[in-house]
Amino acid sequence: MLKDWLFDIKFLFFPDYCLGCNDLLIKEEKKICIACRHDLPIVDLSLNNSDFLNLVFYGRLSLQESASLFYFRKSGKVQNIVHNLKYHGREDVGKLLADWFGYELLEEKRFQTIDAIVPVPLHKKKLRQRGYNQLTTFGLRLAEIYQKPYVEDVLIRKYANTSQTFKDAFSRWMNVKEIFDVQNIEKLAHKHVLLIDDVVTTGATLEACALSLQKIPGVKISILTMAKAE
């Protein structure tokens, strides 16, 4: 009873709102309301290696495997969730998504042979401004689930690029094609790397990251993103 009473007091002064629709959450709901959980455009994780992400990179990258968790639609609920993670300090979203999908990925035998998890890096200036990489909690939790290391000191961003939001595919590629590099390459030599990102649209950023990682001897690459633009 005391626990319920304390919850009611907390709820009165610090109400929680759904990350997807911004409606007030009821007592039993955590971060995302039940209606949004049923309405979110979830990707079937049982899709095989010929899924749509491989089609994005067809002829550009040789991937071991790829997958996304959601379809991303402008002004949709997935966009709201990602923006809460990326711009509003809700790092807990990353852990939420990893817990939600990590064990399902394992059950579907996705990424079984990976040796390490690597995030798309932020430039130091952007990292200072934002205070965190939006992929960190997601990647760290996946690393716990897969029992593999989370490696963020090999793939680096040499300098900040301008926003990708309003660029076409060619402009996006020109904007990122030389901004990534690798260091401490012995950590990933002859390893299978799971490269993670939040949203993939044209794939320019992930392609640039993968091409940098391919400088490492014997490296193999798979890709996992939170969402994929339709």
Image (cartoon, helix red, strand yellow):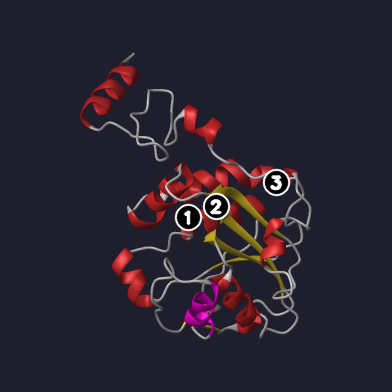
The residue located at (43%, 27%) in the rendering is 29
Which contiguous range is marked in magenta? 169-177
As drawn, the label of residue 109 is none
Q: Secondary structure at mark 2?
A: helix
As drawn, the label of residue 137 is 1
Q: CA distance from mark 1 to mark 2?
A: 6 Å
In the rendered view, does 32 fall on the left or right side of 50? left
In depth, the one of 13 and 212 nearer the eye is 212
The residue located at (72%, 77%) in the rendering is 219
As drawn, the label of residue 45 is 3
Q: Quadrant of the N terminus?
A: top left
The residue located at (68%, 81%) in the rendering is 214
Instruction: Judge depth for marks 2 and 3 and give the one in front.
Output: 3
Residue 189 image-quadrant placement: bottom right
As drawn, the label of residue 141 is 2
In the rendered view, does 43 fall on the left or right side of 138? right
**Label 2 CA crowd tier, 10 Å (few <14, some 14–19, many 20+):** some
Q: How many marks?
A: 3
Residue sitting at the far top: 1
Amino acid on which the number 2 mark rests in the picture = Arg
Q: Secondary structure at mark 1?
A: helix
Q: CA distance from mark 3 to mark 1?
A: 21 Å
Q: Position of residue 70 (x, y in %)?
A: 58, 47
Question: Which sits earlier in the primary sequence, circle 3 or circle 1?
Answer: 3
Q: Up-down: is 101 above or below 174?
A: above
Q: Position of residue 13 (x, y in %)?
A: 20, 29
Q: CA distance from mark 2 to mark 3?
A: 18 Å
Question: Which sits earlier in the primary sequence, circle 2 or circle 3?
Answer: 3
Name the dominant secondary structure of the magenta segment: helix
